[in-house]
Image (cartoon, rainbow, N blue to C red):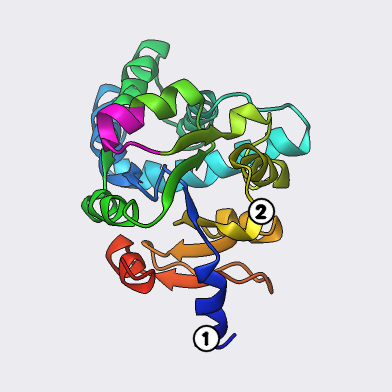
Amino acid sequence: MSDKQTIDIIDKVNTLTFDIFGTVLDLAGSLIPPLDELLKKCHSPASISGADVWQHWRLRQRLEQYQDNLMMLGHSGYLEVKKRALLYTLRMLKIEFTAEIIEEFMTAYQELIPFHDAIEGLKRLGTKYNLVILSNGEEWYLEKLAKNNIGIDFHAVLCAEMVGQFKPHPSVYRFAANRLILEPHQIMMVASHSFDILGARHSGFRGAYVNRYGLPYEESELRPDLVVDDFDELCVKLGV
């Protein structure tokens, strides 16, 4: 696609939908220190770090969500899926734990820290676009994070819970377009996870892949319209 074609497509966008976990909120930076504390309480081997657990846990979280979709279990809850994946990961690593230790650790999800560039970028983007959360989290939890952790007044908070499926199920993106009373091509999904951009593009959205983690995009012809390193670069490419 030529630069002119890309500009013409972007000019039709008036709303940006945002993944929150890992795109706006720094999950690794927020959760690895509490994971280190968890491992100390579990008397785990010194050779296993919170960062090691995080790498395995993060992959298992995605699988848990896909399993829920495939088995048509509905949306079992973002935090519940995270806890379920954590239990699996600890057992896989042969780390013994108690229910009390896990419940104490899960409170870390209330203290998630945003990326600095995301907050400044959202403020800039809000001068030109409607900003909408479109996340796999529960509505109450997202509203709490938006108010207390992110501090941005979003145009709307939409979530997979409202549909009963986890992203990247197409129903989540179609629901968002219907709720916002917009054509899909008027919306651009902004995410640091390529699966989220792929799901959005499959549903007619435009896509901006904020590749914070230096990962390859999916093997698909449905490409993002923009690929950037962070929100600063996203703002420049969107002219704000």
User: Alpha-carbon distance for marks 1 and 2?
Assistant: 21 Å
The residue nearer to you, when weighing 90 against 23, is: 23
At 40% from the left and 68% from the top, the residue drawn is 214
The dominant secondary structure in magenta is: helix
Q: Could you tell me which quadrant the C terminus lies in?
A: bottom left
Q: Which mark is residue 138?
A: none
Q: Indicate the secondary structure of the residue bearing disc 1.
A: helix
Q: Name the residue under label 2.
A: 183
Residue 231 image offset from top left, x and y in percent = 32, 61
Circle 1 residue? 4
Residue at disc 2, secondary structure: loop
Q: Which residue is drawn at 40% across and 20% down?
A: 97
Residue 210 lies, in percent from the top left, at 41, 62
- Residue 194 image-quadrant placement: bottom right
Q: Give the range drawn in magenta.
A: 145-154
Pinpoint residue 1: horizontal percent, then vertical percent. Answer: 59, 85
Q: In which quarter of the image is residue 74?
A: top right
Question: Tag 1: Cα neighbours inside 10 Å, few (<14), some, or many (≥20)?
Answer: few
Q: Position of residue 182 (x, y in %)?
A: 63, 49
Q: Residue at x 56, y 24 (%)?
A: 77
Q: How crowded is mark 2: few (under 14 residues within 10 Å), some or many (20 or more)?
A: some
* Rendered view: 86 above or below 207: above
Asked if the stretch drawn in magenta spans residue 34, the answer is: no
Q: Which amino acid type is shown beneath numbered disc 1?
A: Lys
The question of residue 150 being in magenta is answered with yes
As drawn, is 172 to the left or to the right of 142?
right
Q: Tag 2 or tag 1, which sits nearer the N-term?
A: 1
Residue at the location (30% across, 34% down)?
A: 35
Mark yes or no: residue 13 visible. yes
Q: Which amino acid does label 2 sit on?
A: Glu
